[in-house]
Image (spheres, rainbow, N blue to C red):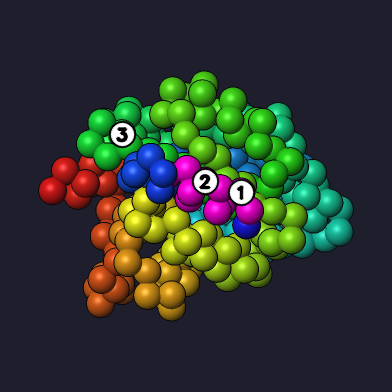
Amino acid sequence: MDKINEFRDKLRLKNIKGLALDIDETLADSNYAWFESMFKFHAPEDMDIENVMKEYKFVEKVPGWDTKEAFDHIKMLTHSEEFNEAVPLMEDANHIVSKIDKIIPILVYLTARPQTVMGATKRWLQKHSFPEAELITRSADIKAGESDLIDRNKWKAEILVNLYPYIQGIIDDNKTLTHELHKLDYQGTLYLYGTDSEEFGNYKHVVICPTWSSVLDKIKS
């Protein structure tokens, strides 16, 4: 947490305020990349990627991908710079983030990617012309499997609470993060990207944003 406190002190001394951005499934179309890579490893019979993604949200849940060999392959991809640097961009995310940055600066990328792929992640952000900003990645003691969603989102929520009010909010797709921030009575704003669900209507910190265009509209308003 020393790095987080140093970053907070830096923002406080300069009196800078702005936003955080998630990366996977917010800026990067990571889920498709994961399923595509696992299809190359072992393709389920008589099913295409789209159908498997629709039926099974996480690669660990797909029959045939729940073996030790598959888990070892998933672990390898998690720490692969080549894989993480090649993940495709969410359509128009970079162009809209550039517009958002002119309204309220993007100050940090906060991601559950491991520290082992920090270099690849920085290169990916640069390749797609995202604003230059701090990058905070998941430390080794925070688990990141499908069953560990609460661990990594609790970690992210605690960082956001620590960085407030200098980091005034985050654009993120993860609904579990919504609950973790609610538990901590978060005073900032979560722009919840990629859903039109009304299940968080009583959460004062949540702004629902189905598309990147809607994120921009909500920030403008």
Question: In the image, residue 57 lies at what x, y percent?
Answer: 55, 60
User: CA–CA distance between discs 3 and 2?
Assistant: 19 Å
The residue that label 1 is drawn on is 3
Q: Which of 133 and 16 is in front in this view?
A: 16
Looking at the image, which residue is at 69% across and 53% down? 139
Q: Find the residue positioned furthest to the left.
A: 221
Q: Earlier in the sequence, mark 3 or mark 1?
A: 1
- Residue under pointer 3: 101
Q: Position of residue 109 (x, y in %)?
A: 49, 42
Which residue corresponds to the image point at 51% horizontal and 38% vertical from the top-left? 134
- Which residue shows up at 74% across the image and 55% down it? 140
Tell me the tag on residue 65.
Answer: none
Residue 54, how many percent across, how many down? 50, 57
Relative to 24, residue 133 above or below:
above
The residue at the far front in this view is: 13
**Tag 2: amino acid:** Phe
Instruction: State the SS at label 1.
Output: helix
Residue positioned 29% across, 52% down in the render: 210
Left or right: 108, with 221 as reference point: right
Residue on which the image places disc 2: 7
Q: Is residue 165 magenta?
A: no
Circle 3: residue type = Asp
